[in-house]
Image (spheres, rainbow, N blue to C red):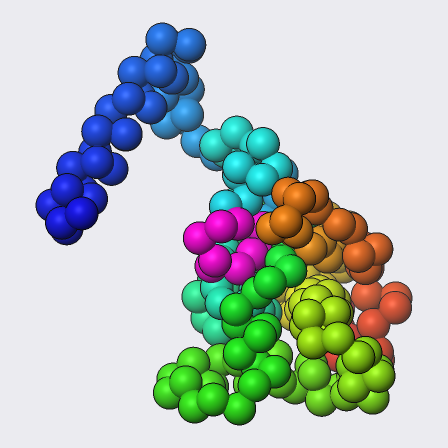
Amino acid sequence: MSDNDVIERLLEQNAQWVDAKVAEDPSYFSEMAKGQHPHTFWIGCADSRVPPEQLTDSRPGDLFVHRNVANLVVHTDFNLLAALDYAVEHLKVQHVVVCGHYGCGGVAAAMGHQDLSIINKWIRNVKDVYQDHVKDLRAIGQDDRRRDRLVELNVIEQVHNLSKTSIIQRAWARGQGPALHGLVYSLEDGRLKDLDVKYANANSLEDIYRFSFE
């Protein structure tokens, strides 16, 4: 399929989608244009197989979404921080979700030794998670199970990283929320798994990471 054919197909599919939505609800787009009020900020992997709106059966406007390789929360990533700040301070989301997925290529790459150029710098964050849990991970005999466990540990670490941000802690200090959650998606059966890692305030956070807003 040529480049032009790909774009033509996307435009055709868009037109068909618009027609179907208008047939179902003539005010669909006019209502959508009035503004957004998402309940959740979703931080997911950039993998093309894990579109959050589809796997949660959400409507446009339900989720404010940021995606990157291996669903990382990095404190020097101003793209993520800008989106987080907007979601929390302006959209007033009630929940922030970090969602990883089993079979993640970024996590698999972090477990290897191949030189991936600029990607090396990004997945170093996942390597750090591996090193923090190296004993437990090495005790897992099967490679795929070890990788899946690192996927889970990586999500848990990114939720922890969220709780360390002044953006989240400032919202908590004024009683706004949001609650933080960690999920993992299975490509094999389409199910989401709750890792039961939740933060709703700074009480369980290590003291050195806490900010004072007095």
Report the span colored magenta: 42-50
Q: Is residue 148 visible?
A: yes
Q: Nearer the viewer, residue 110 or 37?
A: 110
- Where does residue 167 sit, x and y in percent of width and height? 62, 63
What's the residue at 75%, 50% (across, down)? 193
Determine whether 102 is above or below 26 in the image: below
Q: Is residue 126 magenta?
A: no
Q: Could you tell me which quadrant the C terminus lies in?
A: bottom right
What's the residue at 79%, 86% (across, down)? 138
What's the residue at 48%, 64% (across, down)? 68
Q: Is residue 137 found left or right of 43 in the rendered image? A: right
Q: Is residue 85 visible?
A: no
Q: Nearer the viewer, residue 60 or 169?
A: 60
- Where does residue 21 sit, x and y in percent of width and height? 38, 17
Residue at the far front: name it.
Answer: 142
Count of marks placed on residues: 0
- Where does residue 165 sit, x and y in percent of width and height? 65, 70
Determine whether 82 is above or below 116 in the image: above
Q: Is residue 10 found left or right of 111 in the rendered image? A: left
What's the residue at 62%, 58% (across, down)? 101
- Where does residue 134 sit, x and y in percent of width and height? 77, 88
Which picture quadrant has residue 150? bottom right
Q: Is residue 153 found left or right of 125 in the rendered image? A: right
Residue at the far right: name it.
Answer: 203
Determine whether 23 is above or below 197 in the image: above
Which picture quadrant has residue 208? bottom right
